[in-house]
Image: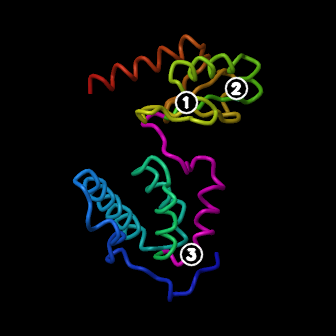
Amino acid sequence: MDNISPAHEASCSTGPAESTATGHTSAELSATDLETQQFNTVCEILRRNNNDPARLIPILQQIQKEYRYLPEEVLTFIATPLRLRPAQVFGVATFYSHFALKPHGKYTIRLCDGTACHVRRSTGILNALYERLNVDEERKTTSDQLFTVETVSCLGACGLAPVMLVNEKVYGQVTPEKALEIVEEIIVKEKQA
Ligand code: FES
């Protein structure tokens, strides 16, 4: 990778943008506290990875684990300490489908729409999830940020088609009814938590 000039280097010790530090209401201050906490976490992730640009992918994975997606401002921010151009960071973040550039729900439902699953009526499952969760192809995440529904191409388990992933858990031979059951179970579990 081509690195940017060391003159662009910034340090995590400079803290988050000063514009968030003054003249805010308490609600805004809470947001600022959160930003500070997340900023510190990003700095810690960079430190753990020795600000090594060769570790960009694990760094992005760790940041995504923290935020559940890769916020644009964080991608821009990490470019400098990693001595990369923001375009390089964005290039990697957008190349791999497992990186999300928009907020994700706590549970990401990935429904396979590869040929085997499509033939076995994955569309009916997708429509049932869209209707139950009030999301669609454009607005993939529920307003409470509990679920994100996405379609993916072949998950490599065609013998189990139609296949659905909820976070890391694989469900095979899914029907619309089974998919809704899984969603309801999660909703109940979250209410009890
Ligand atoms: S087409 Fe769905 S797992 Fe292969």
The response on whether ligand 1 sits within 8 Å of label 2 is yes
Q: CA distance from mark 2 to mark 3?
A: 40 Å
Q: CA distance from mark 1 to mark 2?
A: 13 Å
Residue found at the far left of this picture: 26
Which mark sits nearer the N-terminus, 1 or 2?
A: 2
Residue 185 placement (x, y as % from top left): 40, 18
Quickly name the residue at label 1.
165
Q: Residues within 10 Å of mark 1 (few under 14, many from 20)?
A: some
- Secondary structure under badge 1? strand
Give left or right: position of 186 versus 55. left
Quickly name the residue at label 2.
158
Ligand 1 sits in quadrant: top right
Q: Quadrant of the C terminus?
A: top left
Residue nearer the viewer, 167 or 33: 33
Residue 142 placement (x, y as % from top left): 48, 32
The amino acid type, in three-letter code, at marker 1 is: Leu
- Foreground mark, 1 or 2, reads 1
Name the residue rendered at 52%, 59% in the picture.
Answer: 72
The amino acid type, in three-letter code, at marker 2 is: Cys
Quickly name the residue at label 3.
84
